[in-house]
Image: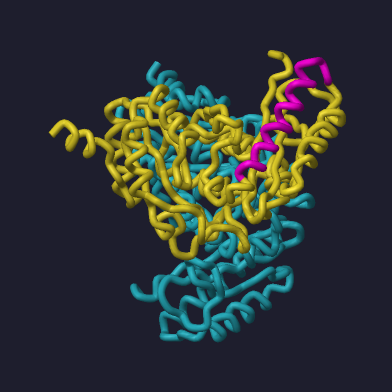
Chain colours: A yellow, B cyan
Amino acid sequence: MAEARAALEMEIVEGSHELFRRVADWQREGAKVGFVPTMGALHEGHLALVRRASELTDKVIVSVFVNPTQFGPNEDFDKYPRDPQQDAEKLQPAGCDLLFLPEIATIYPEGHCTFVDVEGVSDGFEGDQRPGHFRGVATVVSQLFNLVQPDVAVFGEKDAQQVAVVRRLVRDLHVPVKIEALATVREDDGLALSSRNAYLSTEDRQAATVLYRALNAAQKVIEAGERSADTVRAILAEVLASESRLIVDYADVVDAESFKPVEYLDGRIVIPVAGRLAATRLLDNLQIDMENL
Amino acid sequence: MAEARAALEMEIVEGSHELFRRVADWQREGAKVGFVPTMGALHEGHLALVRRASELTDKVIVSVFVNPTQFGPNEDFDKYPRDPQQDAEKLQPAGCDLLFLPEIATIYPEGHCTFVDVEGVSDGFEGDQRPGHFRGVATVVSQLFNLVQPDVAVFGEKDAQQVAVVRRLVRDLHVPVKIEALATVREDDGLALSSRNAYLSTEDRQAATVLYRALNAAQKVIEAGERSADTVRAILAEVLASESRLIVDYADVVDAESFKPVEYLDGRIVIPVAGRLAATRLLDNLQIDMENL
C-alpha cells in the first residue's frame, strides 16, 4: 500500500490548463515552485538538478519535451532517445512532484510564429555549430517559464552557453525566476553525462574522455599561474589532437557572461570544448572564477 | 483634506523592484491586476482603456514609457510628446492605482540583447512602413508583462496590427494574461484620437478626416452587401485620393488574426488605412465581424 501510494505521489500532466490549475493551487498555498526543463532520456546529471530544485523549493516540476525548434534540419530530432516511462520512474524518487509531458501541439499552437532571440551570447560555439539552436532554446524556455511560472529553475553547467543565454534572457525580459546552475555530473573516467553518450560505440566511448583530459590539462596550468588565454588554447588543442578519432568543433576561453573569447584570464571564465566522434556531438566545459582561484 | 488624500491615492513607481513588491502584495490579497501600457501623451482613447481596465480588475497599473526600440532611426522618438505630470493628473480620476514610469535603463538593462519576434502578423502594413517596429513592440510588451504580471491587459483597436501581434505573442508564448481590445475613440468629425494628432497643422487637421471618410464609405458598401475585397479596396483608394494633401501608405482588407489580405469578406476582417500629412503619420481602421453583420 505504501508503495502504491508513493507511486501515485508524482502527477503526470500533459495539458497546459491542467498544469496552470495545479500551479495556481500551489501558489495559493504559498508553495515555492522549482522547475527543471529537460528533453528526457534522463541520467544522473538531470536527477542532480531535480534534487537541487527540491532542496530549494516546495514543489518541483520537471518537463520532458524534445523541443523541435532547437534541432537543425539535419540533426538528431527523430532519433533523440525517448523513454517517458523510465524517465517517470527515475523522477519520483529524486523529488519531482509533477512531470509535465506536453505534446508538440500544446507547446506550439497552430500558426505559431513567435520566437525569442538572445543576440550576442548566442553567437559562436553552439550557435555556429547549430544555427537556430539557441533561438529554439530561448523560445521554448520562455514558453515553459510562462506555463510553469517557477520561482527557481535549475539548469546544468554542462551546457554552459545555454545557461548564459537563459540568464541573459531572464535579465533582459525581466522574467520573474531565479536561475540556478549546477556543476556537471561525470562518469568515473571524467566523461560528462549526456543523453547523447548512448550513441557512442565502445571505441568512441573510450576516446570521449579526451575532452575531460583537455580541460584537466588547462586547469592544471591555470592553477599553476598561467593567465594567457592563447597558451591555454594551445594546450587544449594539443590534448584534443592526441585523439585522432575526434573531430574538434571548438576549444576556447570565453567570458562566462558574454561568451566572448578573452585574451587574459580574469573574472568568471568558461573553457568550452566540443567535437564529434562519428556522428555523435560531445560537449564539455570548465568554469573558473579567477578571483576564487 | 479629502482632495489631498485623493491626490495621494495613485502611486507613482519608477523602479522594477518597487513595482514587483506592490504587485506581489496585491496578488497575496487576491486582487486582479489590470494593465494599460502606453507611451504617454495621454488622450481620451487611453483613458477609455484605463476605465475599462478598472471595470475588469481590482487594481490598475498604467505604464508610461516611450519605448526606443519600436522607433526607427529616422522616426519621432526624440520629439514624441512627453508630459508625465499632465499624464498623472489624467490617470488618477480614470481609475489608475499605480503609474509605472520607468527609465530606459530600467527596461533595457546594460548589455540588453534579447528580442521577441512575431513573424507573419508583423509583416506588411506598419511592419513594412516601420521596419523593426513590431520587434520593439513585442519585446517591450513581453518585458512589461513580466514586470507587471497583469491578469488583463487592455489595448486600443486603433493600432489593429499591434493588437494582432500582441494576441499572437500571448498565444504563442503562453503568457498568462487576457488581452482586451477596445474600440477607437474619435473626435466629433471622426478623426481617431492619437498622440501624434498634436503635430498636425490646421489645414492638415481638416484633411485628416479623409481616413475616417474612406472607412465610412467602405462600411456603407459592405453593409449593402458587397463581399469582394477588391471592390472595397477601390472605394478606399478613390476616397483617399480625393484628399491631395495625403500621401497614402496603404489601404487594404485583411484577416483580423493573421493580418493577411483577403479576397472575399468573411469571418473577422480589418480594413487598415494609413498615410502621411506632411511629416505626420496617421492610421485608422475598421473592424467587422462579417458573421454579426
Kindly give the residue lying farthest to the front in the view shown. Answer: A203
Foreground: B118 or B31? Answer: B118
Q: In which quarter of the image is residue B113?
A: top right
Residue A237 screen position, x and y as percent: 81, 38
Residue for point 54% across, 60% down: A113
Residue B225 screen position, x and y as percent: 41, 85
Residue A206 magenta-highlighted: yes
Residue for point 50% across, 28% down: A178
Tell me the magenta residue range: A205-226
Kindly give the residue lying farthest to the top in the view shown. Answer: A292
Kindly give the residue lying farthest to the left in the view shown. Answer: A1
Foreground: B228 or A10? Answer: A10
Q: Is residue A169 above or below residue B243?
A: above
Foreground: B133 or A243? Answer: A243
| Left-right relation of B249 to B34 | right
Residue for point 76% across, 47% down: A244
| Left-right relation of A205 to B132 | left
Residue for point 82% across, 33% down: A233
Residue A117 screen position, x and y as percent: 63, 48
Foreground: A223 or B233? Answer: A223
| Left-right relation of B116 to B173 | right
| Left-right relation of A82 to A155 | left
Most common SS among magenta residues: helix
Residue B43 magenta-highlighted: no
Q: Is residue A74 above or below residue A174?
A: below
